[in-house]
Amino acid sequence: MSTLFNDKRAPILFAGMFLMLVAVGVLQSWSVTFTLLNMCLISAIMALGVNIQWGYAGLFNVGVMGFAALGGLAAILVSMPPQPAGYAAGGLGILGGLAIGAGTVFASVWTYRRYKRYSYVALVAVVGYLLMRAVIDPAVAAIEAVDPSVSGWLGGLGLPIVLAWPVGALFAAAAAWVIGKVALGLRSDYLAIATLGISEIIIFFLKNEDWLTRGVKNVNGLPRPVPYEVDLQESSAFQGWAQTLGMPVDDASGLFVKVLYTLLFVAVLAFILYLSEKALNSPWGRMMRAIRDNETAAAAMGKNVTWQHLRVFVLGSAVIGLAGAMLVTLDGQFTPTTYNPLRYTFLIWVMVIIGGSGNNWGAVLGGFFIWFFWIQAEPIGLWLIDSLTSGMDPASAVRAHLLEGAAHMRLMTVGIVLLITLRFAPKGLIPEK
């Protein structure tokens, strides 16, 4: 029996996950099921990105939230309409400041290659930075002063939001390349500290640069890749279809939109998973695992370890950025204050560890499994405590306290799941072969 389970472990576990989602639909509602499923799909894509870095190459990236936030930034810059008043107030100053900043970077690189003196590079960087701030600061103040409660920023390009998904991957990949060139030479624990610190800097920037992201005022009303519920409800064809199903039009429209999101996200996940499996089982994938297991031996065989680490770090970060853009698309808003290490780093790492690092199917299962319990811990805990205390006096202060505490069971539930999994499946639910 044990041998049969090990041989069919992945299909059995995915079937169990499917049955748990079906149980939510039967016991709660199908709308809740598809809401949960959509977040599970996005979480699985993020877990795949971390697995590419850690499972393939052993890179300890604790800056997941920064790359996810860059994906969200791409969503608003690509899809939101431009703000003509903002461009008129300070658009040229922003472009001029950015041009000076880019010129400073190129001048610093040229100075280093020409003179090999860090003091000269520092002088060029400081002068360029001061010039950039002198040009860009007045422009920023002018833009943010334009009706700040409604506008006060430059807006985006007004393009379909689906185009923001690959752009989010490019934003995250570009940031990963810069970070990797600086930090990948560090020891693994120092790399973790560096990536965490840089991701916090990214979040701080997004919170405070109102001209670019509206900061803590948030960006709401992002366009959708699927129809709006109101438009469906006004459609006579959809009303007839809802009556055929015996559902109220309001419920049917909400469920239909969520199913469309599910189909989009499943297509993206299947594409990323296919590419990840092809890469893992290719000669490149075998080389990456060899580097992960013994860098010294791989270097002795002529492999450029630093370059390969940079490549896999950029690839994994691009997948995380893609998922970040998808998440903002699903939410319909960009809220920089919601990005925190617990949700966008710790939880994603738990998904990879429990699913099975080094195994793409394990990362996907971990994304589904952990997000399911992260969301369902509260209703399950409430039901459990209500059942256990049903014999107590309804006015009991102890019972009221326990029922109130059910809303805070998420962290405890995830911790228990993690401990049990590490005890009985230390290599994850679907370990690396």
Image (spheres, grey):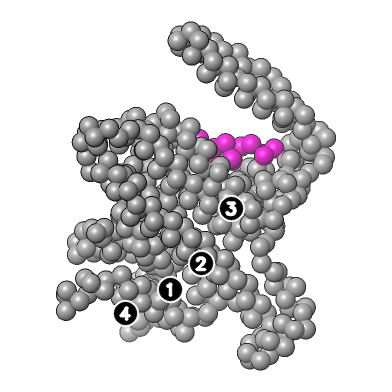
Q: Measure the alpha-carbon separation of dots 2 and 4.
A: 39 Å
Q: 266 left or right of 395? A: right
- Residue range in magenta is 201-212
Which residue is denoted by mark 3 in the rendering?
165
Between disc 3 and disc 4, the foreground one is 3
Instruction: Please report whichever mark, 4 or 1, sits nearer to the chain's N-terminal start.
Output: 1
Q: Measure the alpha-carbon separation of dots 3 and 1.
A: 33 Å
Q: Nearer the viewer, residue 313 or 298?
A: 298
**210 in magenta:** yes
Query: Would residue 374 be visible to someone looking at this image?
Result: no
Between disc 2 and disc 1, the foreground one is 2
Between disc 4 and disc 1, the foreground one is 1
Pointer 1 local density, CA inside 10 Å: few below 14, some 14–19, many at least 20: some
- Amino acid at circle 2: Val
Q: Which circle marks residue 130 in the picture? A: none
Instruction: Please report whichever mark, 3 or 1, sits nearer to the chain's N-terminal start.
Output: 3
Residue 83 at x, y percent in the picture: 78, 44
Q: Which circle marks residue 266 in the picture? A: 2
- C-beta proximity under 8 Å, tags 2 and 4: no
**Magenta-colored segment: predominant secondary structure:** helix
Residue 423 at x, y percent in the picture: 19, 61
Q: Determine the secondary structure under disc 2.
A: helix
Residue 110 at x, y percent in the picture: 54, 15
